[in-house]
Amino acid sequence: MPHISTIGRKSWPAMLAFTLMYLFLIVGGVTMVVPFLVMVANSFKSNVDSKEYFELVPKYWTDQHTLTLKYIEQQTNYHLDLFNAVARANESKLEDYKPPAPANAAQVADYRVFAKELPTTFVLLCNRGGLDDTAVRAYGTHPAVRDYRKYLLSKAKYQSLQGVEKAYGIVLLDVEQLNPPFELWFQRPFQPEVNLRMRDFLEFKKTQPVDRLVPVSAESCWNRYLYLNVTPETPKANEKLGTNYTSVETAPLSLRKPSRPPELVKAWEDFVRNDIPIWFVRADDTAFPVWQAFLRKRYQNNFTLFRKAHEDYYITNELPFPYKRFEDISLPKETPLYDGVAMGEWADFINKDLPLDAVYLDTPEQRYRDFMKAKYATAQGVNQAYGTDYQDFAGIYLPSVNVMAADVQTNGRAIKWEFITRNYRTVVNYLLLHGRSFFNTAVFILLALFFTLTVNPVTAYALSRFKLKATNKVLLFLLATMAFPAEIAMIPNFLILKELHLLNTFWALVLPGMANGFSIFLLKGMFDGLPQDLYEAASLDGASEFVIFWRVTMPLVKPFLAYLALGTFVASYSAFAFAFLLCPSPKMWTLMVFLQQMKWASQPVQFAAFVLASIPTLIVFVTCQRVIMQGIILPTEK
């Protein structure tokens, strides 16, 4: 019988009460659903667009500008300094950058041919997620990283993770820790690893598609030097240096030591000595006597000391030692990359003794201009092919960002799909390759469901069916367990299980929650409400007590058992502190414990992990909704 009659519902107090009630329900529903939708939307994002928290639809799905920024962020490996170097910009955050017009097809094709011919120290591998191990994991597993792992684990290389460990002399817990080595070719302090790992990486980089290679800009290093060490204001820079730059951000870099003004000469000398990456510095033959004197001084004019310092490289690579005396040592034509001692010598020579009149710079920009000149002869020929308005070859810069914008224009759908799936793919790979989280969680849930749906009903049935003298006291004891939070029992449970030597076992997860006082109390009430005639009829038919319990009683309380099973599933699936305390070994960690360890991940990747973690519970609720609702309503009606 309804509490309010049909006629009473038409009165304004009743209508107002219903309106307020529905408003509260709607607001409550919105406050539950909207945060989840926000989390889902943010799980498809990256750093450049993750600041827009309350977008229910990621902007890059429909906005070309945002998609272009995300792609540029990816191609510059989420490194702001690298982005500024590639884009010849001085942005403090990528979101403020306005991408240039896309390059046309001819310019993209020429740029790809040029970039593929550059030395490995002139290009960076992009689309790898970051420039170090932490960043690679934080921003998701990118295609270049996936290909790098396949390359090392292929039959042509090391075949297995154990083979990689043996070759590199390192320990890897899983494939997720197998990441490309650190590379920052656009920064002067960077010293690459001189080992087999770096050599393999550079060989792998040569096999990569050209759209995963981004040339390092030497001229942007010069612009950055002027911006930080002279002044960011162009008029003041011209006044200090005696130049007529149109902008500090596009100031040309002289390949040879300038003859004047003196202030510019001084700045160029300081830039070459201390700032430009050594990969771009070359020396002509006039520096050879100074190089010889430098080595003699460094090794106290003792060739034996020189040989001892260098022979490890030749022994390791099974090469004959090429020198017999100091006079045989030639001036390096480029930076010795694979010989760490020789690379250190060359860097020190540039820093201190290299005559600057002998220096000439070999930069990607100048190589690009020479490439254009060889193909089109004049700037007008370039303009005709590209639709640009260059006045001369000196005004031609690397169109890296223009090419990235063109990639978005032509391959936007594939790029967008990669962004949509990357965070989720990263989480799945992490969970599948780390420990046994899925297996442990599944076993824990199945055991918890089994004991919940057997121990609690059997106990409640016994208390209801057999009139024991101590029934009320038992019920009072069971209800008393509800007066204390579960966290209070956590430490005693830990100590007891430790004494029983059950830590890091499934028993440790299942035993503490095997019986639930509240569930037993409710089940007993439901059993008490069942007609006694059913039991008497079953007994007259010759049914045993177990048959009465299993075939008569249990089907009648199936909706409540479904509700109880859902609660057990949610509690077991979402257990973190309890599971982590009783099973500290990573081999026994459940899914939630592993997700809690993803502190290395960026916020969008963490959101993707949370969304994936919520799917099983959502599926269980949706598929069992009718039975669960009956389990909620039935006890209320009783």
Image (cartoon, rainbow, N blue to C red):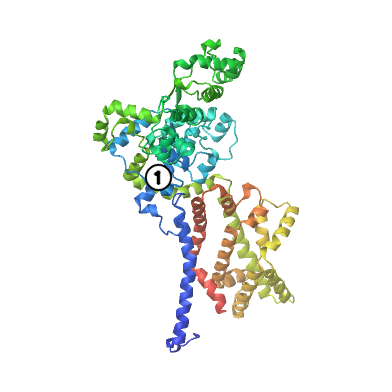
Q: Which residue is mark 1?
A: 71
Residue 315 in the image: x percent, y percent? 57, 18
The residue sitting at 43% across, 47% down in the picture is 94
- Residue 614 vs 550, above or below: the answer is above
Q: Quadrant of the C terminus?
A: bottom right
Residue 354 in the image: x percent, y percent? 50, 21
Between 420 and 353, the residue placed more toward the observer is 353
Give the quarter of the image for residue 238: top left
Q: Is residue 203 visible?
A: no
Image-based side of 318 in relation to 235, left or right: right
Image-based side of 219 in relation to 578, left or right: left
Q: Is residue 163 visible?
A: yes
- Residue 359 vs 491, above or below: the answer is above
Between 53 and 294, the residue placed more toward the observer is 294
Residue 215 in the image: x percent, y percent? 41, 33
Between 281 and 121, the residue placed more toward the observer is 281
Residue 328 in the image: x percent, y percent? 52, 11
The amino acid pointed to by label 1 is: Tyr
The residue sitting at 37% across, 28% down in the picture is 366
The residue sitting at 40% across, 40% down in the picture is 235
Between 16 and 5, the residue placed more toward the observer is 16
The residue sitting at 53% across, 34% down in the picture is 160
**Outermost residue toward the bottom?**
7
Tag 1, which secondary structure?
A: helix
Image-based side of 471 in relation to 254, left or right: right
Give the quarter of the image for residue 450: bottom right
- Residue 280 vs 418, above or below: the answer is above
Determine crowd level at label 1: few under 14, some 14-19, many 20+ residues with C-alpha closer than 10 A. Answer: many
Give the quarter of the image for residue 303: top right
